[in-house]
């Protein structure tokens, strides 16, 4: 890792992705490596989010989506779930003012109704305070999974078809985007997953159709903005063809 910001200088600021999505993985292993319990890893993962958000601001990434709690994470030990929810509430309480000052809009994707009440209240407050900010939009995926989103989308489209608001023939990609919980948000150009795992794990399946995937061995609590810059440089070295051939892109 280059400590002198040389990495950042290699970034073409005219071709920075608008939207980066991150599967933050490896907190448990990081904690174990440090002889600590899993929550120690999650707590240290908050510093990584802070650093990445700062990096996004520095190079002009407009949307950052982070996978904080999946619908499958309810299967974890009760103490870890409670610890994660408390960490979320505490982090919002301690960070929201600073983030608000820095123009960060914060919202959630997923079904909040199963989260503890104090968590729901804290998230609502966070969204309300930051709703007019437009420097960067941080979306926290909580009790989220892509299949949940697809099921909810299909149900809501069906309801509107049944009520005559929409006809079945009108259903296209635009309509599906509009009904999904990412409505109005551009698809991510880049997905980062930390900790060496090379899976999508039920994250943004519809939205990732043309996304560049970047996997790194770095465990999430060690991930900093310099690692983000490295991922962006790697992304910029790729040719995004969207089904075309190279020669067509030069036209
Ligand atoms: C994955 O690592 C991490 C999570 C499921 C939780 C991520 C949460 C945070 C970084 C902190 C809370 C978030 C906010 C927005 C304040 P893992 O536990 O699966 O690690 P392992 O694969 O090494 O066990």
Image: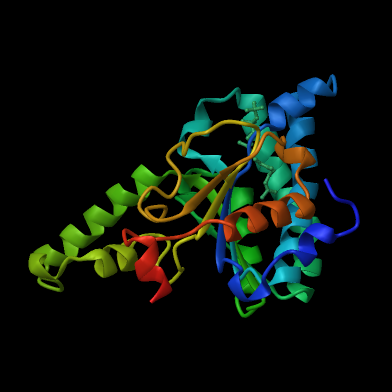
Give the x, y percent position of residue 63: 58, 66
Q: Is residue 91 above or below residue 244?
A: above
Quadrant containing the N terminus is top right
Q: Quadrant of residue 174?
A: bottom left
Q: Quadrant of residue 32?
A: top right
**Residue toward you, 88 or 11:** 11
Q: Is residue 31 left or right of residue 111?
A: right
Q: Quadrant of ligand 1?
A: top right
State the residue at coordinates (31%, 58%). 243
Q: Is residue 54 visible?
A: no
Q: Is residue 39 left or right of residue 181?
A: right
Q: Is residue 236 visible?
A: yes
Q: How was the colour assigned to the protein in this rendering?
A: rainbow
Give the x, y percent position of residue 195: 65, 33
State the residue at coordinates (23%, 54%). 154
Most extreme residue toward the front, as rendered? 247
Q: Is residue 246 left or right of residue 230?
A: left
Count every numbered label the image shows and give the total. Answer: 0
Give the x, y percent position of residue 72: 47, 32
Give the x, y percent position of residue 127: 60, 67
Quadrant containing the C terminus is bottom left
Q: Is residue 34 left or right of residue 232?
A: right
Q: Is residue 148 above or below residue 105?
A: above
**Residue toward you, 236 or 134:** 236
State the residue at coordinates (84%, 60%). 6
**Residue toward you, 19 or 137:** 19
């Amino acid at each position: 890792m280059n400590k002198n910001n040389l990495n950042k200088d290699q970034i073409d600021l005219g071709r920075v992705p608008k939207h980066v999505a991150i599967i933050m993985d490896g907190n448990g292993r990081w904690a174990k490596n440090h002889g600590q319990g899993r929550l120690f890893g999650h707590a240290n993962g908050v510093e990584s989010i802070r650093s990445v958000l700062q990096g996004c601001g520095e190079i002009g990434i407009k949307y950052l989506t982070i996978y904080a709690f999946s619908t499958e994470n309810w299967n974890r030990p009760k103490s870890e779930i409670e610890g994660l929810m408390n960490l979320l509430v505490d982090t919002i309480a301690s960070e929201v003012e600073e983030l608000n000052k820095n123009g960060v809009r914060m919202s959630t994707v997923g079904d909040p109704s199963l989260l503890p009440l104090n968590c729901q209240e804290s998230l609502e407050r966070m969204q309300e305070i930051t709703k007019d900010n437009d420097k960067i939009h941080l979306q926290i995926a909580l009790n989220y999974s892509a299949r949940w989103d697809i099921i909810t989308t299909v149900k809501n489209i069906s309801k509107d078809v049944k009520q005559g608001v929409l006809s079945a023939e009108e259903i296209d990609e635009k309509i599906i985007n509009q009904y999904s919980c990412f409505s109005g948000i551009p698809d991510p150009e880049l997905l980062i997953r930390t900790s060496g795992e090379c899976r999508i794990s039920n994250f943004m399946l519809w939205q990732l159709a043309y996304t560049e995937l970047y996997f790194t061995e770095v465990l999430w609590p060690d991930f900093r903005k310099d690692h983000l810059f490295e991922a962006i440089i790697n992304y910029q070295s790729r040719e995004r063809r969207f089904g075309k051939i190279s020669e067509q892109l030069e036209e």
